[in-house]
Image: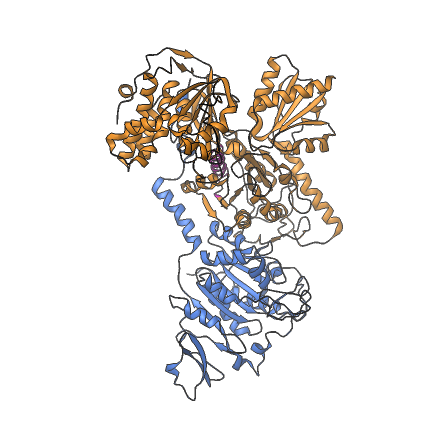
Chain colours: A blue, B orange
Amino acid sequence: MSTELPVLKPADFASDQDVRWCPGCGDYSILAQMKKVLPELGSTRENTVFISGIGCSSRFPYYMNTYGMHSIHGRAPAFATGLKSTRPELDIWVITGDGDALSIGGNHFMHIVRRNVDVNIILFNNAIYGLTKGQYSPTSKVGSVTKSTPRGSIDHPLNPISVAIAAEASFVARSIDTNIKHLVAMMKRAAAHKGTSFLEVYQNCNVFNDGIWDYAKNKNTKADTTLLLEHGKPLIYAGGTKGIQLNGFNPEVVDLANVAQDDLLFHDEKAPNSQLAFLLSRMRHPDFPEPIGVFRDVDRPTYDDMINSQVDDAVSEKGAGELQKLFHSGDTWQVN
Amino acid sequence: MISANEQFPPTQKPSESVSGVTVRLAGDSGDGMQLLGTQLTNTSALSGNDVATFPDFPAEIRAPRGTRAGVSGFQVQFSAEEIFTPGDGLDALVCMNPAALITNLSDLKGTGILIVNSDSFDAKDLKLAKLEENPLDDGTIEKYRTIRVPMTTLTRGAVEPTGLSVKLADRCKNFFAMGLVFWLYGRDVEPTLRFIENKFSSKPEIAEANRLALKAGWHYGETTEDFASTYQVPKAELKPGTYRNVMGNQALAWGLIAASKLSGKELFLGSYPITPASDILHELSKHKNFGVRTFQAEDEIAAVCSAVGAAFGGSMAVTTSSGPGIALKGEGMGLGLILELPMIIIDVQRGGPSTGLPTKTEQSDLMMAMYGRNGESPLPIIAARSPSDCFQTAIEAWQIATRYMTPVVILSDGYIANGAEPWKIPEIDTLPKIDVCHPTEFNGDDEFLPYKRDENLARPWALPGTPNLMHRVGGLEKQDGTGNVSYDPANHQHMVETRAKKVELVADFVAEAELEGSDNGTLVISWGGTYGACHTAVQTCVAEGMNVGHVHLRWINPFPRNLESLIQQYDQIVVPELNTGQMSALLRQQFLVDAVGINKIQGKPFHVNEIIDGIKTAAREVVS
């Protein structure tokens, strides 16, 4: 005999609030895929929590019929750490943007990742500050002409995947807002991973930074500009005509007419060291195809497991705390 | 272990009974003065005296040796009467080097005893203390009864049988000094022998050396002709019960643990190390078997934000810091306030602004606690008045936080945090039960309204994981009732006023202000860690026949309901504070009263005499 669980549909995860992103924004697609993914994962609305910072993407929790917190700029990882440490049974998603996670929240991002708190972080990377109407962000390319950089930005950008790997991330992946099938797959992989899952999504801001990811999205170019990562497989792209080979410490584009597949670099998302994942993260357009998929997926104890097992251990070693015993520990004296 | 009575025989010299003694132990920050002071405090408390302490140490872990900046002091008053301060003038001052002597001598009473380590006054020591002349010879100490003890030489001789190196032997001299002080005041050495046994259990030769040094100090007192007599301080008449010593930070931690138990909510602390608040983190991290989770965050902001996250999840959430950290937490506190989640923010105040005086006390964060956030963002504020009061303060703060669904600020200070006093251990069943409930059902027509309020204007604390009550909270202004984002002008005004009203309502729950002393004339209004000094000063004034009353505020926001009527009874209001007049400003603002400040901003607590002088000056002015 089985107990029938109510089958939830994407619409069940939609809140009653009107979505207020600009028409054509890449955020819509990510929201739609999330509503699709959660029922497929068997998530419940009551045990799911979305926590965001500030920015366009951070409005996300308001649109989900789950628990949610629209917090402070850059600090979502800290709220998530407090919640997950005390309520480890909850499924927590952190929604953030390039400015939120890497500029004002760079510190918290780095620390949640190194602690390996079991939450899923989705970084909507549009390389611009949208909600404040178009200033350059920490992922904007040098020379970006924006509201605050009329002569072009002079800040060297951060590479979100590289930052996550350097911060000891146990799961790192990249996807694209309009590549629906791939995005769904990556969300599911992120959810399945125990520990901090970091998913960068190339997201188009059609108002302030339109088309920056076109090279990776356009059906005429994407085969040549992106490379689908598959665990245990050689790095091949451009319809099977090109591959990546290692030359010393550096990746090199090679023509498969001249090089055997066995001589190519093979992807290993489970590699104990992060060198390969880091090397892949450094492959950027236009010099290289940009890897899409899971860069790294390794097991490491989670912060929430450990903080709770220290409590359990203390209870089993010392017994559940008693105030009477605590107050009378050490020297006491009697006044009659 | 040696038997105390054989090895430390009671003195054969005459013994004078005195009602109380104030002793300060001063030396280099590596000389072990804090340890000496703690031992003297504990043994005095265990023998039934009332005690109060004032540790005073530099911010540097090992400040340059022998310099004035490196002087570390520990003052303790032990008394046969109930006392509220560590004392003003010193009856005895122990100085381990010239720097300690020159920076502390002015606090020694004319009748006081000065005990110096005469071995540490050579040319090099004087130079380190920036002294041209030796203060032992140039008349500086002429008016004091000075006992010159070659402590270094005597300690080396005493510990010789253990074969310790000279360097290690010299580190035992605080135990020599301890032996001498214990002998002088007839203190029981047993607790200290136990302490040595435990502390140095893995280093038996060090334990033995310390015991030998302690014994040598004791016997030196008995043998030397410099001391003709000793002093005895009889037991104090305290309320019956079981007592222990507590320090303020420890009592705060224990109060939090108690509040957690009383409310059935597991405690989560998000904290970043900062002086003088870190000991709360240290203490709580030891008690994980109470269900305590401590999170040492990457910064102050993450600390407060993690606490808000834990509060959203239904924990008893706490963040602890000092002024510079509270400045960083402002935005997170504001979010906790607009989310209307219960939590506790503890500010152990220290000298400011900026990094200021990390190890020194001050009361200068009051305005920051009141107004240090963007927007209209009132929070209830309670200030602990003494080390033991920290326990009750933590419990009250959590009662208010849960009853009114709001973050609550606790103000402590460096003086309370590190000071110790006897604490009458409460019977567990006398502690208040704190009822907390989490809804599981709709509270509206077929819907859940996360901002629907009860009679205290508190909203329901619905927890993630509860079916059907899914809701979103956030920092954007929200519509009352639904909690949905709202930019409606009238709603914003309504919400601002509602959040303020909620804080005002706290006055319904908290105790009215208690008046001590005269009900007319001059009213002294104090708050926080100055309680002991103000209380003692007012008692003294009343005993001298002056019309002086005293109200000590624990709840500062809101003020107790009866404060206004009390103020109206008096000709004059005097407000002693360790700042430039922040409470005076609040009282003036709220009650249109001309509060006269007694203000000290030296990183040190008040002397009782400073307050008495201030009261008398103010009283003269109102008469003339």
Q: Is residue B51 left or right of residue B164?
A: right
Assess whether residue A94 is covered by the magenta stretch. Answer: no
Q: Nearer the viewer, residue A315 or B121?
A: B121
Residue sitting at x 58%, y 78%: A215
Assess whether residue B252 is covered by the magenta stretch. Answer: yes
Residue sitting at x 53%, y 71%: A175
Q: Position of residue A322 (x, y in %)?
A: 41, 35
Q: Is residue B414 visible?
A: yes
Chain part drawn in magenta: B248-267
Q: Quadrant of residue A258?
A: bottom left
Q: Position of residue B600 (x, y in %)?
A: 61, 30
A13 in relation to B128, above or below: below
Report the predominant secondary structure element of the magenta stretch: helix
A14 in relation to B293, above or below: below
Q: Nearer the viewer, residue A25 or B434?
A: A25
Q: Position of residue A224 (x, y in %)?
A: 52, 82
Q: Is residue B428 visible?
A: no
Q: Nearer the viewer, residue A305 or B173?
A: B173
Q: Position of residue B565 (x, y in %)?
A: 70, 24
